[in-house]
Amino acid sequence: MASPYSDLDRPPLSSRALSRALLIPGAFWSRLDVRAETGSTNADAIEAAHHGEPEGLVVVAEQQSAGRGRRDRQWTSPPRAGLTLSVLLRPGRPDREKGWAPASPAAFSWLPLLAGVALREAVHRVAEVDASLKWPNDLLIKDAQSHVGKGAGILAEMSGEAVVVGIGLNVSTRADELPETTGLPATSLRVAGAAHVDREPLLRALLRGVADWYEGWREADGDAELCGLLAAYRRGCSTIDQDVRVLLPGGGELTGRATAVDPDGRLVVRTADDRDHHVSAGDVLHVR
């Protein structure tokens, strides 16, 4: 029988198998929406939030036509070559059944970093590649020749008291399919020589990791240090101990040495005058 898919090594995700694995009694995830194509999974999840969807929704798209990253940069990938998904969280709502108090809005900035920790762990465990986190929202992947490229991006958006976290990971994208970039070159798990590029185990591991870290973070009332999230992020962050140039919102610029990520999730940059600056947002360039 002829296959309806032009790339036989890029089979579609099985919504039924994923639902059986993830939507189980007592699990965090409540609904899984796998779409063949959409404009933006973040936009879809935000629309669901507007209609009262509870937290625990996952929207996955085999292809996006209007995916975007930070500063409205476009995120593109061939059909079924990556993982493109968004999750809906409501950290500001109490959960009496689980004993969760509302998390402070000041702690919400940890949610994209939390997703980064879960993504790095899933890629290490399933794909068996060397990956690290570039503050605040990129996953860097290193190949056998120690070449480093950007393999994933994370974008968190607020909608009222809901937070939607979007993740885009290049999985089986070939070198000639990767987009041109102005900073670090783009890469994929396949280009980096990953041991496995099956998307379903990666997606299951990623979502279980996000749920585990999020539940621990909520149980700690949004305290990233208490739940171990701060330590895990610091362990996986390659920005720490790098000379950096930070492009700040509004057009400012900061150069210095990244010395830490603080308990609020901010990057600590020590400038030449020996002053520490706590940066909450900005584009970071690793200066070599």
Image: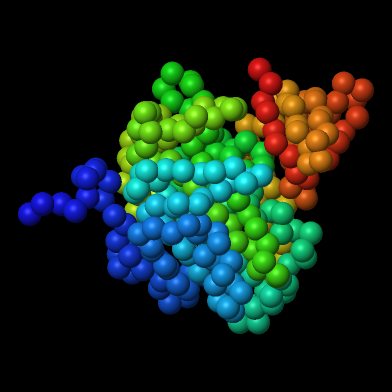
x, y percentage for residue 25? 43, 77
Dividing the picture into quadrants, the one containing residue 153 is: top right
- Residue 67 is left or right of residue 170, and the answer is right
Q: Is residue 233 shown above or below 53?
A: above
Count of numbered marks: 0
Q: Is residue 212 shown above or below 250?
A: below
Q: Is residue 21 shown above or below 174?
A: below
Colour scheme of the picture: rainbow
Nearer to me, 5 or 90? 5
Q: Evaluate whether residue 208 shows in this view.
A: no
x, y percentage for residue 119? 51, 47
x, y percentage for residue 283? 70, 36
- Residue 3 is left or right of residue 257, and the answer is left
- Residue 221 is left or right of residue 51, and the answer is right
Q: Is residue 270 shown above or below 98?
A: above
Nearer to me, 231 or 185? 185
Q: Quadrant of the C terminus?
A: top right
Which residue sits furthest bottom?
Answer: 96
x, y percentage for residue 238? 62, 31
Nearer to me, 104 or 215? 104
Residue drawn at point x = 75 percent, y = 32 percent:
246
Q: Evaluate whether residue 281 shows in this view.
A: yes
Residue drawn at point x = 26 percent, y = 51 percent:
11
Residue drawn at point x = 54 percent, y = 43 percent:
74
Q: Quadrant of the N terminus?
A: bottom left
Residue drawn at point x = 74 percent, y = 39 percent:
282
Nearer to me, 81 or 117? 81
